[in-house]
Image (cartoon, grey):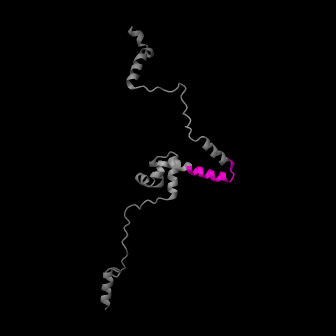
């Protein structure tokens, strides 16, 4: 009877032919899958709004760029808006408690809503005119004799 019970154990898969229990096969090959967390989402949104490149962000959080784009597409696309909205929510919460700087900040944001950003400062000579290659060559040919003094020699 003992032989039959040993044969039954081997057939059922509980022990191998040496009597060692058989456990589930765990395949641990390859890199573990990336775990997306709320903290990572906020961090990616913050870093993209701060002007970091996708390559730099991926390196920082320890994943591949493709993985970053797969899991954080919304944060990469709308990161600056997400961070600004979070900051405005914090300011609103503080303003409700009577925090005057938060109230002033919210009023400034509301007042400046829809206004374009101030223009970049121009150089002292004014805005530069864009000129094509041929036009620039013609202008250079017209002014070449003035700069080098060759015009006097050729007359």
Q: Is residue 10 above or below residue 33?
A: below
> How far from the left and from the top, in percent, is residue 82?
53, 50
> How far from the left and from the top, in percent, is residue 55?
44, 48
Q: Give whichever of 37, 63 is nearer the camera.
A: 37
Q: Give whichever of 53, 31 is nearer the camera.
A: 53
Please tell me how many numbered marks the rendered image carries.
Answer: 0
> How far from the left and from the top, in percent, is residue 118?
56, 35
Image point (51%, 27%), residue name: 127
Question: Does 136 sit left or right of 88 as displayed?
Answer: left
Q: Give whichever of 142, 96 is nearer the camera.
A: 96
Q: Is residue 88 magenta?
A: yes
Image point (63%, 43%), residue name: 108
> How far from the left and from the top, in percent, is residue 77?
47, 48
Q: Is residue 1 magenta?
A: no
Q: Give whichever of 4, 46 is nearer the camera.
A: 46
Question: Does 141 sit left or right of 80 as displayed?
Answer: left
Where's the N terminus, which quadrant? bottom left
Farthest top residue?
A: 155
Residue stretch rendered in magenta on the structure: 85-100
Where's the C terminus, which quadrant? top left
Image point (38%, 9%), residue name: 154
Q: Main secondary structure of the magenta part?
A: helix
Image point (52%, 57%), residue name: 39
């Amino acid at each position: 009877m003992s032989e039959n019970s040993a044969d039954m154990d081997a057939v059922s898969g509980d022990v191998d032919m040496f009597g060692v229990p058989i456990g589930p096969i765990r395949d641990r090959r390859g890199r573990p899958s990336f775990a997306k967390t709320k903290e990572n989402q906020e961090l990616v949104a913050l870093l993209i709004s701060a002007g970091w490149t996708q390559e730099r962000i991926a390196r920082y959080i320890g994943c591949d760029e493709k993985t970053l784009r797969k899991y954080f597409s919304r944060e990469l696309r709308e990161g600056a808006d997400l961070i600004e909205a979070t900051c405005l929510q914090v300011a609103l919460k503080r303003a409700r408690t009577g925090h005057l700087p938060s109230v002033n900040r919210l009023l400034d944001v509301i007042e400046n809503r829809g206004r374009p950003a101030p223009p970049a400062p121009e150089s002292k000579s004014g805005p530069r005119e864009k000129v094509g290659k041929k036009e620039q060559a013609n202008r250079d040919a017209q002014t070449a004799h003035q700069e080098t003094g060759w015009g006097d020699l050729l007359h």
